[in-house]
Image: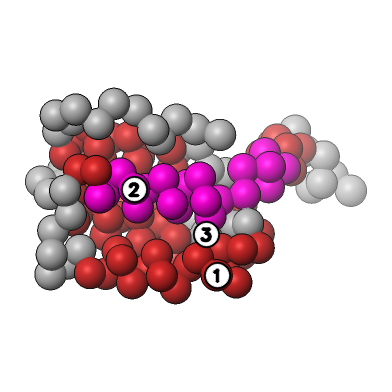
Amino acid sequence: QPEVMGGVGGEAVERFGARLVSITDRLPFNMVKDADADLWDTYRDNTLQSEAYGKVIESVLFVETQLIDDAFQPIWHQELREVWISKCKACAGNPPSHPEALSLLRDFFLGGMDWAAVERFWEVDDEDDAGGFEDI
């Protein structure tokens, strides 16, 4: 499970965006709906250049829409997702503070993501790289 708790002090928006990119860089491409490199390069650039926490939250929303259902805990779609998306979308009209933005990141990555599934997808990705499945 990646570190998303970190220090809350006067952390700059740029560092916050870099933290998000660092976490999403750990996700295997076989866990995303669209693995187009240009799409993810644009996401990365936009996130790293964000000048407000609300823009970083827009990037988190993008990531959420790009992940396949298996990336999430069952409770995410059953109970948590709708409320979380509503809170994220509210950031457009009411920019979040650092603690509010960090809370949204935590809710997503620690409450919604199924990190055991992420690990399993990495194992399959590694087997594909080794030629395991393609050679069958």
Q: Quick one: quadrant of the N terminus?
A: top right
Side of 49 relative to 62 (left or right): left
The answer to whether any part of residue 14 appears in the image is yes
**Quarter of image, res 10:** top left
Which residue is disc 1 drawn over?
Answer: 79
Compared to residue 104, the image places residue 88 above or below, namely below
Q: Nearer the viewer, residue 96 or 52?
A: 96
Q: Main SS type for the magenta part? A: helix
First in sequence, mark 1 or 2: give its number.
Answer: 1
Asked whether residue 107 is drawn in magenta, I would say yes
Which residue is disc 2 drawn over?
Answer: 103
Local SS, label 2: helix
Local SS, label 1: helix
Separation of residues labelled 2 and 3 (CA atoms): 20 Å
Residue 82 x/y as whole percent: 44, 73
Residue 129 x/y as whole percent: 69, 36
Residue lying at 12% horizontally and 69% vertically, measured from the top left: 93
**Quarter of image, res 95:** bottom left
Which residue is disc 3 drawn over?
Answer: 67
Q: Amino acid at mark 3?
A: Leu
Compared to residue 61, the image places residue 107 above or below, namely above
The span shown in magenta is 100-120
